[in-house]
Amino acid sequence: MKDWTPERIAWVDVESTGNRPETDLLLEVAVVVTSAGLRELGRESLVIDHAWEDVDAIEMVDVVREMHEKNGLFEEIREREYLVSMEEADHRMTTLLNSCCEGLEDQRIPLGGCSTWIDRSLVRLHLPKFYSRLHHRGLDASSLKLAMVNWAGDRFHRKKYPHRALGDTLSAISLTRSIKRRLFELKRLRVEVEELKRELRSRQEEARLLGACP
């Protein structure tokens, strides 16, 4: 029996102090679990408590600091009302995933998202229990979008959310649903073209037979 299942997808996004997993810190994480057909089964979104006395003193590049000030993440961290420890975040993420995967406890789940290598690296370092439930296979919506642009000439636009973990996760799912609908449209068109070709061949054969009659 294989050790993973395509029946569930764990869509994940993280907000951090940067894109260097070994040195940057995870600030916020969200997971949305869906079926293979992209029906939402559950979600969790958490802001991490690093017990900072002054978030302004934390080292990060200006563009990241400005982004988190604008999207309200730093304001939530300063208020410290709904923050959770990294251990609690790991536990709650894992619990949510397991609750959405009843009967699949011995199988790992593909990771979904946009440019998932960053999220996977941070999750691997900071959320080990949750990471242990993930398979190395994944569904990267940004890669799907690039393929559709390059090979089908289609353009897709992600829904605009504030640059927060849950919003970006939902945006990735929305983008994938749009691509899925387009793929089904292309499949339907291909079937219609094949039916027209069969009809054309049938008429050509009928004309040939009629032309052969004296």
Image: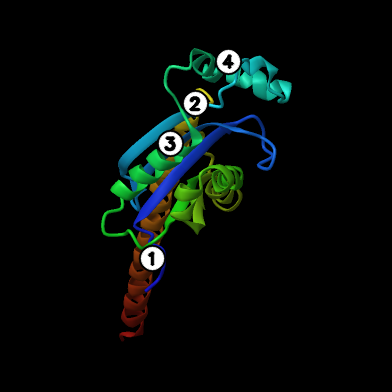
Q: Which residue is mark 2?
A: 160
Is label 2 in a helix, a strand or a loop?
Answer: loop
* In front: label 3 or label 1: 3
Q: Tell me the CA gap for discs 3 and 4.
A: 26 Å
Residue hosting label 1: 194
Is 21 above or below relative to 185? above
Which image quarter holds the C terminus?
Answer: bottom left
What is the three-letter code of the residue carrying label 2?
Lys
Residue ID for mark 4:
70
Whether residue 173 appears in this view of the structure is: yes
Identity, as a three-letter code, of the amino acid under mark 3: Glu
Label 4 SS: helix
Q: Which mark is residue 212?
A: none
Quadrant position of the N terminus in the picture: bottom left
Foreground mark, 4 or 1?
A: 4
In primary-sequence order, the first of circles 2 and 1 is 2
User: Disc 4 or disc 2, which is closer to the eye?
Assistant: 4
Q: Measure how far apart labels 2 and 3 are at the Cα level.
A: 29 Å
Picture residue at 45% right of the left edge, 41% below the top: 90
Gap in Å between the C-alphas at discs 2 and 1? 38 Å
